Image (spheres, rainbow, N blue to C red):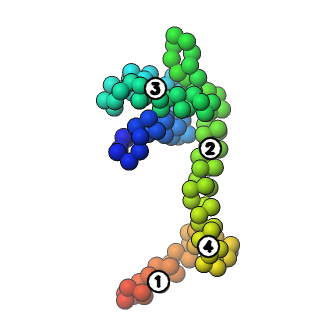
Amino acid sequence: MLDEGSPLFLQIAQQLSTDIIEGTLAEGSRVPSTNEFAAFYRINPATAAKGINLLVDDGVLEKRRGIGMFVIVGARDRLIQLRRKEFAEQFIDPLLVEARRLGITADELVDLIRPGPADHDRQKLSNEKEGGAS
């Protein structure tokens, strides 16, 4: 799971978020401890704690004194809402800006995104440009 592309604590938070969204970590369930994360991924417990605390700050996890960290009820919906917002900011907004710049209409954009006959037409154009046949 862990790679060298982003800080480890962010990767821990991202993986926990994904597990909650996918249902691997159900609402109300206990989250592995910082020491468990540290041992499993061979990282510093403070790094694991920093990742977990990001989700506490986001209102996704709660600490139950003496028991551990737990997924808050409603966490999945909250995370989906946050991820959708991030998705729009990272992908949709730049897509729309570039589409406007290129004069692509909303209908044309939908056709580019929607699977179906347009996929075949794009593949055919790609093959023709490369000198092949469809």
Placement of the N terminus among the 4 image quadrants: top left
Kindly identify which numbered label has been placed on residue 82.
2
Q: Nearer the observer, disc 1 or disc 4?
A: 4
Q: In which quarter of the image is residue 91?
A: bottom right
Report x, y in % for residue 125.
Answer: 47, 84
Residue 52 seen by the camera: yes
**Which SS class for mark 3?**
helix
Q: Which amino acid does label 4 sit on?
A: Ala
Residue at 41% over, 45% down: 6
Placement of the C terminus among the 4 image quadrants: bottom left
C-alpha span from label 2 to label 3: 21 Å
- Are the residues tagged 3 and 1 within 8 Å (C-beta)? no
- Dot 2 or dot 3: first in sequence order is 3
Q: Which amino acid does label 3 sit on?
A: Ala
Report x, y in % for residue 52.
Answer: 50, 29
- Dot 3 or dot 4: first in sequence order is 3
- Are the residues tagged 2 and 3 within 8 Å (C-beta)? no
Q: In terms of depth relative to the viewer, which is nearer, 61 or 128?
A: 61
Q: Nearer the observer, disc 3 or disc 1?
A: 3
- Are the residues tagged 2 and 1 within 8 Å (C-beta)? no
Q: Which amino acid does label 2 sit on?
A: Leu
Q: Nearer the observer, disc 2 or disc 3?
A: 3
Report x, y in % for residue 130.
Answer: 38, 85
Kindly identify which numbered label has been placed on residue 49.
3
